[in-house]
Amino acid sequence: MEDLLRVDGISKTYPKKKEKVKALEDVSFQVREGELVGLLGPNGAGKTTMVKIICGLVAPDKGKVMVSGFNPWEKRSKALENLSAVLEGNRNIYWPLTVRENLDFFAALKGEKPKMVRGRVDELISLLNLEDKVNVTARSLSRGMQQKLALAVALVVDVPVLILDEPTLGLDVESALEIRGMLQNVVREENKTVLLTTHDMRLVKAVCPRVIIINEGKIVTDDRVDNLLRLFEVKSYRLHLGSPLTPEQELEVKGIENTFFSNGEGNGVCIDVQLEDMENLYLILDILRKNNSAIESIERKEIDLEEVFLEIVGRRGANGKSGSFGSSV
Ligand SMILES: Nc1ncnc2c1ncn2[C@@H]1O[C@H](COP(=O)(O)OP(=O)(O)OP(=O)(O)O)[C@@H](O)[C@H]1O
Ligand SMILES: [Mg+2]
């Protein structure tokens, strides 16, 4: 299948007083027709800069981008005809117009008559639960509703490439789920090529089979999510104990490699053990046996995408626990 989005050797540095900020360095990737790819990375990694370069809003210092075969810096209108985007700050909606007028207006800008898009407009309004707001101006909508309208505007005309910069940022759980459902729909039924930046790992898991992770302006990973989960999977078990350990036991447990200790519910404690070496589990059981400490349950811990992400961008805490990144839903 054709690569509808090609990014070749893009570098971008922003001037900043005396120093310069390197936002992207030699970034290359391709997205095939009908593929939905997540572009992930910590704050300041360069995601929005990449999105703006693809949309022809920021000029790269080096490299080039092709959207459906057109370079937005050479064939601007051709490239933009093939692309819809939702950028930070909902810049693609028009404040004085109502929800319905916005949808009609942006469809008209792309050459569609209101009558022709009526069905599509009604469908988008209903999918995003905006029925009560059709006659409300964009200015008077809540931020979350503006975000949903921005997505609807991007989807109202049928263009092959969709670029979304943090579409669920700041949305409540229900609205984020609506957007997630909508993206699943877009992929399943409309064969769109989508590049999506987000910090919402549940959204990534639900809709992106492949992710590109950038850190400090460089690609550090470009792989399928299931490969990444497999790659980082370590067999890890969590033991729940109903009562605390003695100080001696606690010290001994903490001395075992790849073992993490935390307080559980009430008086209880949890011990996480990674079974790279079965011997560790036997050592723990020996320590527990000394005081007849009762094990309430043992569960297998699954690695999640958030942990994989933190591992890749080197943000994992020293105690092996992940930080608070991601999962805004
Ligand atoms: N207009 C600008 N002028 C100067 N520096 C900028 C400008 N836009 C972005 N930067 C810098 O470029 C780097 C990348 O920023 P960018 O907004 O692309 O990151 P991001 O990955 O989208 O981050 P976030 O997750 O916070 O949205 C940062 O160091 C940022 O401070
Ligand atoms: Mg950004």
Image (cartoon, rainbow, N blue to C red):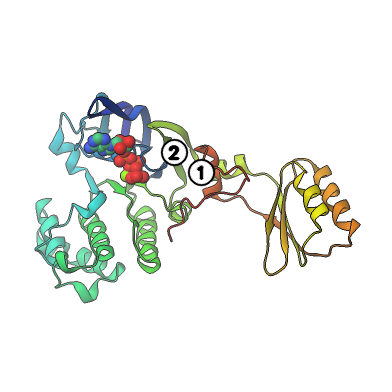
Residue denoted by label 1: 309
Q: Is mark 2 on a helix, strand or loop?
A: strand
Q: In which quarter of the image is residue 299?
A: bottom right
Q: Residue 213 carries which label?
A: 2
In front of the other: 242 or 234: 242
Residues under numbered marks 2 and 1 in contact, where contact means CB atoms less than 8 Å apart:
yes
* x then y, percent, for residue 85: 24, 48
Q: Is mark 1 on a helix, strand or loop?
A: helix
Quarter of the image with the C terminus is: bottom left
Q: Which of 254 and 182 is in front in this view?
A: 254
Residue at left 47%, top 50%?
A: 325
Query: Which residue does the image show at 15% across and 28% down from the upper left?
Result: 74
Ligand 2 in which quarter: top left
Task: Give the numbered dot on residue 38.
Answer: none
Q: Please, which residue is most extreme toward the front here?
A: 247
**Comes first in the chain, label 2 or label 1:** 2
Q: Quadrant of the N terminus?
A: top left
**Res 98 seen here:** yes
164 on left or right of 270: left
Q: Residue furthest top?
A: 62
Question: Toward the viewer: 266 or 172?
Answer: 266
Spatial separation of the CA atoms under disc 2 and disc 1: 8 Å
Q: What residue type is labelled 1?
A: Phe
Q: How crowded is mark 2: few (under 14 residues within 10 Å), some or many (20 or more)?
A: many
